[in-house]
Image (spheres, rainbow, N blue to C red):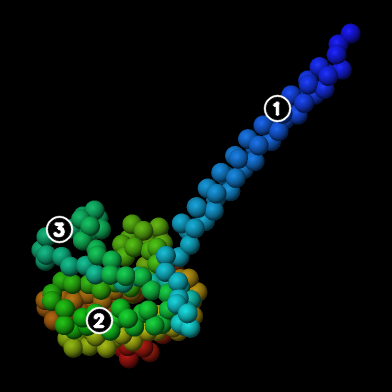
Amino acid sequence: MNNKFDALKDDDSGDHDQNEENGTQKDSEKEKNEKEKNQGSSRKKSVVPGPAEHPLQYNYTFWYSRRTPGRPTSSQSYEQNIKQIGTFASVEQFWRFYSHMVRPGDLTGHSDFHLFKEGIKPMWEDDANKNGGKWIIRLRKGLASRCWENLILAMLGEQFMVGEEICGAVVSVRFQGQNKLQKYQNCFVNTRIYSCFADLLSV
């Protein structure tokens, strides 16, 4: 007849195995939760409004690009040529960038300023832009700075009231003395955007 202590020993070893299995499951769940937490953190906005600042509905990023006229540009070289200036999430953060930037009217030829929602690159290959369109307005020399400022302030202030349809805006300076304002959107162009565009720029 088996010793009763042997039976207890067997039972204890079984519990020990079960405890080890439970511990392993808890460790794997902990690792999974930690991984999901880290992934969630990486999806968060990179910039947030500071204390007592006035948040914008969307975060935006300023970009700058310049190219040599007459030289063909591939999508790869164009992407390499775009320089990110900075991202902002509040009215105050916007003015910290904008007040130190050169005005479009003072830029040299074939230079562009871009202002796009955070996470959207100012190029057609970006998923947010590739199925969309853009408005282009050509301006006489001397009007670019005022019209650019009016446009981006309206965009940041959600004056167009078209939800997520607008992706960003671009001002392009060219040697011929003629400048362009461009507004990118992610779906079909509508009359509301045109109407607001015309009112803002008095065109």
Under tag 2, what secondary structure? loop
| Amino acid type of the residue tagged 1 in the rendering | Asp
Q: Is residue 134 visible?
A: no
Could you say which quadrant of the image residue 156 lies in?
A: bottom left
Viewer-proximal residue among 104 and 92:
92
The C terminus: image quadrant: bottom left
Query: How far across and how far down the image is residue 123, in percent?
Result: 31, 62
Please tell me which of labels 1 and 3 falls first in the chain.
1
Viewer-proximal residue among 51 and 110:
51
C-alpha span from label 2 to label 3: 31 Å
Label number found at residue 17: 1
According to the picture, the residue beneath numbered tag 2 turns out to be 100
| Amino acid type of the residue tagged 2 in the rendering | His
Viewer-proximal residue among 51 and 111:
51
Query: How far across and how far down the image is residue 38, in percent?
Result: 50, 53
| Residue that protrudes farthest toward the right in the picture | 1
The N terminus: image quadrant: top right
According to the picture, the residue beneath numbered tag 3 turns out to be 72
Q: Is disc 2 surrounded by few (<14), some (14 to 19) or many (20+) residues within 10 Å?
A: few
| Residue that protrudes farthest toward the top in the picture | 1
| Amino acid type of the residue tagged 3 in the rendering | Pro
C-alpha span from label 1 to label 3: 69 Å
Residue at 34%, 63% (x, y): give it.
121
